[in-house]
Image (spheres, rainbow, N blue to C red):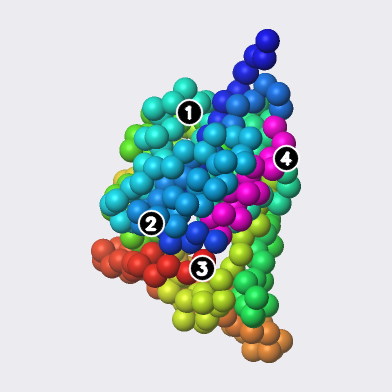
Amino acid sequence: MEVHNTSATIAIITCRRPIWLKRLLESLTKQNIDDSTVLNILVVDNASEQTTVDVVNEVSSLSPFKITYACEKTPGIVAARNKCVTEFLQTDAQYLFFIDDDEWPAEESWAQNLLNKQKEYNADVVTSHILSVGEPGTPEWAVELIYGKNPLQEGETVNKFYTNNLLICRHVLEQINPAFDKRFAMTGASDYHFALKCTKAGFKAFYTNAPVIEEFPKSRATVKWFLRRGFRSGIGFTRSHLFEDSLFSAIFFCLTMASVRLVRAIGYFLLGIVTLNKTTLVNSLFRFCSFAGTIAGFFGIKHEEYKTIHGN
């Protein structure tokens, strides 16, 4: 008689990306897990499209894991993320994975590796990095810039993490509920804000080497997109700390980080001029916009990044 000691759900948020969703689902069906592990997959559709239902049904028919489809009609990444958490908490699963629909695991042991490291480190949260590859025709400078070099080491504790490659223990989501704040509905940074809440609640997050691969769409490979992303990330950073820290602490910390970002922007700009390297120059502009966004966040300015859908 089989005894299952571990149960986990992989959550995917999708919105008008049926081709990429199918690629991810097919990759997940190839995951190798221990005999003692039960793995399920949850797809939350934020667009209510029949093409998404068709993809789920097609892959489900051949999948060794149960795949569940759910619809979240409220637009925005926050509502979709919270739908994932709600659906998960209605089951008896112990762990919730998050992976994006433009990604796929680098190895067939990805899910089991994260589960193993959770036990090894007695972690509340386990995260890993992203390997970016360009959609055909995407310039190399953009692919190099989106994530840069991974600075983390195996077993390192982290205080920020994102829902593009993440494992969360059930007790974390039972305590921090709702997990994602609707004030970030269309602006991004709700996962950074969630990480900040986890850290303040005393939960421990660890890094492990279990990457996923992301296809970076050609439509994002513009200087304008990177500048907007830098501005948006800076705003989200400041708003997160204003929501969770004391006013004095938030102002001091955010102004300090704004200064650091400005200095780095100047440094990268000078280096880019000397080397005539486009990646370095755009990186400097990205960091300057992040500085500007960090200041703009104090004034309630928002940038709604998620109105435009990139990819397939």
Q: Residue 311 carries which label?
A: 3
Residue 285: which numbered mark, if any? Answer: none
Residue 160 lies, in percent from the top left, at 52, 48
Q: What residue type is labelled 3?
A: Gly
Quickly name the residue at label 4: 109
Q: Nearer the viewer, mark 1 or mark 4?
A: 4
Q: Is mark 1 on a helix, strand or loop?
A: helix
Please tell me which residue is depicted at 57% across the width and 26% down the height of the picture: 7
**Which amino acid, by three-letter code, is at mark 4?**
Ser
Q: Is mark 3 on a helix, strand or loop?
A: loop
Residue 5 in the figure: left or right of residue 95: right
Q: Where is residue 51 in the image (x, y as percent from the top left)?
A: 44, 57
Q: Mark 2 points at which residue?
A: 49
The answer to whether 168 appears left or right of 270 in the picture is left
Query: Relative to the observer, which residue lies in front, 305 or 22?
Result: 22
Residue range highlighted in magenta:
20-33
